[in-house]
Amino acid sequence: MRATGAAAIASSLTPAGPIVLDCVKLHLSAAGGAAENFTVTINSETADVYDTVLFSQDMTTVTDIFWQPDRPIPIVNSDVVDFAYANGNTRTYGLEVIYRLET
């Protein structure tokens, strides 16, 4: 999955079946410059009480993120993975998510 722009990041990965999340890459054209977090969250299909923030990073001084979980993360039950960042300073971004189908 890839996304780019210069506004807020509000992207979702909605798999058609079970997947395994391998890594997330994010590049900003310049450091974020504001105390805003980039987050990766499992939005549970079951109920909101099961939503889980997998990763959160303050982007104030950050231009690049490469997040690879210690172990791949299975995404099941029609759960959606949300990627969010307010991007108040309108940095141009490139977001790439690497995952694989679970058989």
Image (cartoon, rainbow, N blue to C red):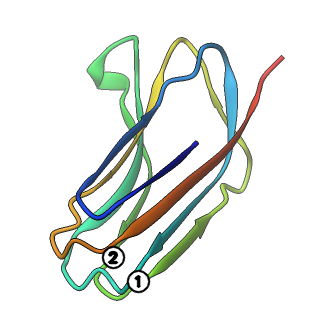
**Could you tell me which quadrant the C terminus lies in?**
top right
Q: Amino acid at mark 1?
A: Val
The quadrant holding residue 66 is bottom right
Q: Is residue 44 above or below residue 53?
A: above
The circle drawn on residue 9 is none
> Is 8 or 67 nearer to us in this picture?
8
Instruction: Identify the residue at image location x=40%, y=22%.
Output: 44
Q: Residues within 10 Å of mark 2 (few under 14, many from 20)?
A: many
How far from the left and from the top, in percent, is residue 25?
Answer: 58, 62
How many numbered circles does the render carry?
Answer: 2
Q: Which element carries disc 1, helix, strand or loop?
A: loop
**Could you tell me which quadrant the N terminus lies in?**
top right
How far from the left and from the top, in percent, is residue 32?
Answer: 29, 80
Instruction: Identify the residue at image location x=37%, y=24%.
Output: 50
How far from the left and from the top, in percent, is residue 18?
Answer: 67, 18
Say whether marks 2 and 1 touch (CB < 8 Å).
yes
Hey, which residue is sitting farthest left in the picture? 88
Instruction: Identify the residue at image location x=55%, y=12%.
Output: 77
To which residue does mark 2 refer? 59
The circle drawn on residue 62 is 1
Q: Is residue 84 above or below residue 58?
A: above
Q: Is residue 80 above or below residue 88?
A: above
